[in-house]
Image (spheres, rainbow, N blue to C red):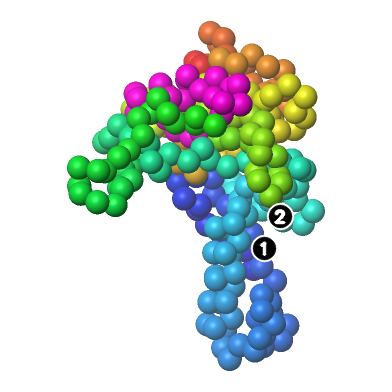
Amino acid sequence: MLVIFHWRRDPNLYAIKVEFPTAPKSSWTGLPVASADEWAADVASRLQEELDTGLVRRSRRMIRDGYVLLDTHDAPDVGPAGFFISSVPLDDVVLSPVPSSRSFWKRSYVTFSLGSPSASVSRPASKAGSWLAKAGMDVTIPRQLIVEAKLACWLQARVNNARGRPVVGHAAASWEDKQHTTVRLDLVHIQPGVPSEVRDALVRLTVCEAAEAGALHVVTAIDDPELHRLGFRPVNGGGLTLHTSSAEPPSDSTADA
């Protein structure tokens, strides 16, 4: 059986193969099921858990009849060995309100101290990513994007240990247009001595974040041969572009990055 679905605002149409049952039991838990409806509900629950834990991001992909067939067999980890990548937390940072419902940042984040209402505090954008700055990384661009209400995503790479330290890189991207169809990769950086796979993973996951937020393209002025290997292509007027839809052609000579 082929289950076809959309994921969040991603422009791709995805599909995954599900084997029909050969016995009245769950393929997920192994427990008995009493009906086809119960089996289908069990499959739906398993798929939801897989999707919530990165099924789309970690699967191998094959284009088939206009949809993207996902295969998790022997799929590589989304992060390189020895490192993990996550969003830079902004829960206690003052974010400028963005009227569009398609924005990542839909709320004003404020943390409150115990005591009177006047004790409520929130960090200004100038303090966002302070640990990255302390590690010697330039956070000027993402902080400015927060102020301008244009930040699409801000990712950080850390060593995968009990402390999650040190931080070894980060990437930031912004909304290029008011319609939120295009995301610009503004920054990607790794510290000296860090494997290039970490940089690649930061870019790949930035593209995933953009696609899941509804972006159709990712553009950048960063001129790096490694980006070509990740699917970016030159465009007229300079810069590179990448279609977030896997069904789109690999290059677009008329685009303007």
Q: Earlier in the sequence, mark 2 or mark 1?
A: 1
- Tell me the SS state at disc 1: strand
Residue at horizontal 34 percent and vertical 23 percent from the top: 148
Residue 168: quadrant of the picture:
top right
> Which kind of residue does numbered mark 2 sit on?
Asp
Residue at horizontal 54 percent and vertical 83 percent from the top: 38
Of badges 2 and 1, nearer the viewer stands 2
Residue 136, x across and y down, in percent: 60, 21
Residues at marks 2 and 1, CA–CA distance in whole angstroms: 8 Å
Q: Which residue is mark 1?
A: 17
Could you tell me if residue 241 is visible in this image? no
Could you tell me if residue 38 is visible in this image? yes
Q: Which residue is mark 2?
A: 71
Left or right: 4 in relation to 176: right
Residue that sits furthest to the top in the current view: 237
Residue that sits furthest to the bottom in the current view: 34
Q: Nearer the viewer, residue 152 or 44?
A: 152
Q: Is residue 28 above or below residue 57?
A: below
Left or right: 76 in relation to 35: right
Residue 228: quadrant of the picture:
top right
Dot 2 alpha-carbon crowd within 10 angstroms: few under 14, some 14 to 19, many 20 or more: some
